Amino acid sequence: MPGDVFTAPERSKTMAITSEYKPARFCWVDLAAADSRAAADFYRGLFGWQTETQPANGGEFRRFTADGETVASLYQLDKRQIAAGVPSHWTPYISVADIDESVSRAVTLGGRVVVKPFRVDGMARVSLITDADGALTGLWELAK
């Protein structure tokens, strides 16, 4: 609006990983890629990000790092997802105190569950939902 002054918030060291998981705050972002090697090469070239492989749930994913800090994660879409036409995509995650309650509330408010809550070894319980307008987001409950 004319006359209003907006001040940009102070930048944090990272957007994707935080040392505090306050409810209702973005806390993580990951990339699901049809070709995770090509994606890793692209972001390495674009931003200088490095990758570190981490085991999880009987498989693995990669952490993108910059200046020794994790900035995002990367995982390979599986063959079924690729065959079904799922494109490579970024997913932002929002921290929640109780993922089961948050998923239930999302459905009550007109959202849809895309991926039911599941545990990512040693990290979190996560779920993917769409809001009432169809926008995809992840919910993230820090592992206890």
Image (cartoon, grey):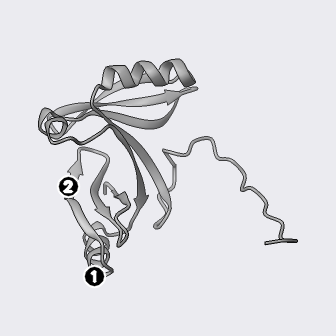
Local crowd at mark 1 within 10 Å, few (<14), some, or many (≥20)?
A: few
Q: Is residue 38 above or below residue 123?
A: above
**Spot occupied by residue 124 in the image (x, y as percentages of width and height):** 31, 52
Instruction: Farthest residue to the left: give it.
Output: 80
- The C terminus - image quarter: bottom left
Disc tally is 2
**Spot occupied by residue 90 in the image (x, y as percentages of width and height):** 39, 43
Q: Secondary structure at mark 2?
A: strand
Q: Secondary structure at mark 1?
A: helix
Distance from Cα at disc 1 to Cα at disc 2: 20 Å
Tell me if 22 is positioned left or right of 13 in this view. left
Splitting the image into 4 quarters, where does residue 133 fall? bottom left
Q: Is residue 35 above or below residue 72?
A: above
Q: Earlier in the sequence, mark 1 or mark 2?
A: 1
**Could you tell me the amino acid type at mark 2?**
Phe
Local crowd at mark 2 within 10 Å, few (<14), some, or many (≥20)?
A: few
**Spot occupied by residue 41 in the image (x, y as percentages of width and height):** 42, 18
Q: Which residue is mark 1?
A: 108
Q: Which residue is mark 2?
A: 118
**Could you tell me the amino acid type at mark 1?**
Thr
Splitting the image into 4 quarters, where does residue 75 fall? top left
Q: Nearer the viewer, residue 29 or 81?
A: 81
Residue depicted at 30% across the width and 72% down the height: 111
Tell which tag, 1 or 2, sits nearer the viewer.
1
Residue depicted at 68% across the width and 47% down the height: 11
Splitting the image into 4 quarters, where does residue 39 fall? top left
Q: Is residue 103 above or below residue 136?
A: below
* Discs 1, 2 touching: Cβ within 8 Å: no
| Numbered label attached to residue 126 | none
Q: Nearer the viewer, residue 33 or 64?
A: 33
**Spot occupied by residue 46 in the image (x, y as percentages of width and height):** 55, 23
Residue depicted at 83% across the width and 66% down the height: 5
